[in-house]
Image (spheres, grey):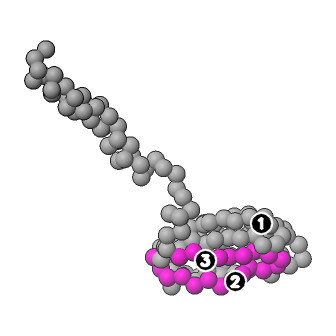
Amino acid sequence: MNSELKQALPALAVVALVIIVGPKFLNSNSNAPSNHAPTIQEDTKGRTIMLHTSDWKFEPSTIRLKKGENVSLHLMGIQGNHGVAIPGLGIKESMAQGEMKLVKIPTDKVGTFDFFCNVQCGAGHGDMQGTIIIE
Ligand SMILES: [Cu+2]
């Protein structure tokens, strides 16, 4: 082996390593956004509105949103076992006491969307109603 080649060997080794390992790094980086699991933080971009369920009310019972706004409902089961059904927006969740759920609200259409409890929760079940207004 001549001395020139000997001197070049470490550099060649580095080049070979970059060629072998480099594409793996590049691939994993470019795949990262599509194959990592969604996080709560990503889901809460925009506005988050708390909606508490208890015996026998929703708090708040009126929610006003802007059309096109990025908004999530942060459901919290404060007391009792209830449900949150918003048929006009395709949302239907059961909420046990102590449970928390994050639900994206579609705001692509304006309108008044009634919501109600869809779990037979007792004497005040019929009082559990509210409205989401998207304008
Ligand atoms: Cu109910």
What element does badge 2 sit on?
loop
Q: Which mark is residue 49?
A: 3
Q: Give the residue at the far right of this rendering.
A: 123
The residue that disc 2 covers is: 61
- Give the residue type that dot 1 points to: Gly
Q: CA distance from mark 3 to mark 1?
A: 17 Å
Asked if residue 55 lies in the magenta stretch, the reply is: yes
Q: Are marks 1 and 2 in contact (CB under 8 Å)?
A: no
The front one of 129 and 16 is: 16
- Position of 47 with respect to 17 (left or right) is right
The front one of 103 and 86 is: 103
In the rendered structure, which disc, 3 or 1, sits on the residue that comes first in sequence?
3
Residue occupying image coordinates x 52% and y 56%:
38
Asked if residue 80 lies in the magenta stretch, the reply is: no
Residue occupying image coordinates x 9% and y 23%:
4
Q: Quadrant of the N terminus?
A: top left
The residue that disc 1 covers is: 98
- Position of 113 with respect to 99 (left or right) is left
Ligand 1 has an atom within 8 Å of the beta carbon of the residue at disc 3: no
- Give the residue type that dot 2 points to: Ser
Q: Position of residue 113 (x, y in %)?
A: 61, 78
Residue occupying image coordinates x 68% and y 70%:
75
Q: Position of residue 56 (x, y in %)?
A: 82, 78
Q: Position of residue 104 (x, y in %)?
A: 56, 67
- Give the residue type that dot 3 points to: Ile
What element does badge 1 sit on?
loop
Q: Which residues are magenta?
A: 47-68
Q: Give the residue at the far front of this rendering.
A: 3
